Every structure is written in structure tokens, then in C-alpha cells.
Image (cartoon, rainbow, N blue to C red):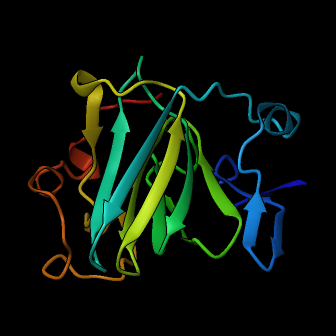
């Protein structure tokens, strides 16, 4: 059974699927196109991405792709735990510049659906965290962009400070929200 729950920004959804456990472990069906379509998620996911982060406090993001390669994402944690963040970059949205923050971990059956028009990132809460996410558009390096993860204007309560975070040089130089040109109407 597939359950959907909207968050503070209603277009971002938590998705829970049934998990069947026995002495061997568990089994769960994490994606079935028709079940997702019945719940209104009509995306054709075309690429799976996976990241592994060895250390607690690894920050990846806040990333997005500019149109026409903007991506909707379906995120789940295979091992460990993250604080997952989605920032609304749609200028016409009443939630522009606001974010949602939710903990995802490998022990639950929860996934996060983020539509196009959002920047996405996360911080690892456990060592050896592995994150898998489906996207509905291929990676296009020429359209890759982002927002600075620690921009004070975003008011995100990260579990690490900028001096503690493990972050890529690229992500350290992303623009603040007020420096970002209009990307999504």
C-alpha cells in the first residue's frame, strides 16, 4: 500500500510503502509507476543516482537543474540517516524561499518526492550513509546549479555549522538566494 503525506510546502510529499519483515530481514516495493500515478505522481523517472558519505556532517547541496533539464526527485536512504532539505525556488509560489526539512533513514519505509522548481540537499546524520534518488530528467552539466546551503536568508537549521560541515569546493561557492536569477516562474 502506498501512503502520501503533504508537508508544510504541499507539493513536497512524504511517501510510505509497506515493509514486510520476517526472520530474514524485510522486503518492500519502493516504486511502482501505476501506484504512484494513482496518487498523482505522474513522473517518468529516467535516471537513478546514488551517493555514499562516509562521515557524519557531510552536506550535499543545495542543487537543482535549470529548465529544460529541471528535475523532480524521489529520494530514499539505503543506509544511515539524513536531514533532507527542499527549498522552493518558484518565484510565483507563496512559499518562494521557504524550505522543508525532514529526517529520512534506512529504518523506515519513507521516501521524499520533490517536484521541479526546488533546490535539494541533505546532511548526513550517521556514518556510511547511502542515498538513492530517482530523477525524471537526465543530468545535464550545462544546466547544473544551486544555492549556498548555509545562506542565512534560508533560515535552515542544519545539524552542523559551516566550519564543521564536510562539503565540496563547488558547493561552497554557490550563490545566495538573493543572488540567484529567476530560474523557475
> Left of 168 or right of it: where is 13?
right
| Res 155 visible | no
Residue 115 vertical placement versus 125 (above, below): above
Name which residue lies at 48% across and 28% down: 185
> Left of 5 or right of it: where is 124?
left
Residue 122 vertical placement versus 11 (above, below): below
Residue furthest to the front in view is 24
Q: How many marks?
A: 0
| Res 106 visible | yes
The x, y position of residue 45, in whole percent, is 59, 29
The x, y position of residue 103, in whole percent, is 55, 74
Name which residue lies at 74% across and 35% down: 41
Residue 68 vertical placement versus 65 (above, below): above
Name which residue lies at 84% across and 31% down: 34
The x, y position of residue 10, in whole percent, is 70, 52
Q: Nearer the viewer, residue 180 or 78?
A: 78
> Left of 88 or right of it: where is 162?
left
Q: Nearer the viewer, residue 134 or 115?
A: 134
Image quadrant where one finds the N terminus: bottom right
The x, y position of residue 71, in whole percent, is 48, 32
Name which residue lies at 25% across and 67% down: 150
Residue furthest to the top in view is 68
Amino acid at each position: 500500500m502506498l501512503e502520501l503525506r503533504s508537508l508544510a510546502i504541499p507539493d513536497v510529499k512524504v511517501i510510505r510503502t509497506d515493509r514486510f519483515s520476517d526472520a530474514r530481514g524485510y522486503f518492500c516495493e519502493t516504486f511502482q509507476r501505476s501506484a504512484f500515478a494513482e496518487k498523482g505522481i505522474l513522473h517518468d523517472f529516467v535516471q537513478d543516482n546514488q551517493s555514499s558519505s562516509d562521515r557524519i556532517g557531510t552536506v550535499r547541496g543545495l542543487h537543482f537543474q535549470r529548465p529544460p533539464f529541471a528535475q523532480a526527485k524521489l529520494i530514499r536512504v539505503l543506509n544511515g540517516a539524513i536531514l533532507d532539505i527542499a527549498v522552493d525556488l518558484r518565484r510565483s509560489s507563496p512559499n518562494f524561499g521557504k524550505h522543508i526539512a525532514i529526517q529520512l533513514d534506512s529504518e523506515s519505509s519513507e521516501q521524499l518526492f520533490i517536484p521541479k522548481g526546488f533546490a535539494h540537499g541533505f546532511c548526513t546524520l550517521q556514518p556510511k550513509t547511502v542515498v538513492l534518488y530517482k530523477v525524471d530528467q537526465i543530468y545535464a552539466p550545462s544546466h547544473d546549479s544551486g544555492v549556498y546551503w548555509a545562506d542565512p536568508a534560508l533560515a535552515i537549521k542544519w545539524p552542523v555549522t559551516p566550519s564543521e560541515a564536510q562539503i565540496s569546493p563547488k558547493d561552497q561557492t554557490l550563490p545566495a538566494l538573493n543572488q540567484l536569477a529567476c530560474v523557475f516562474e
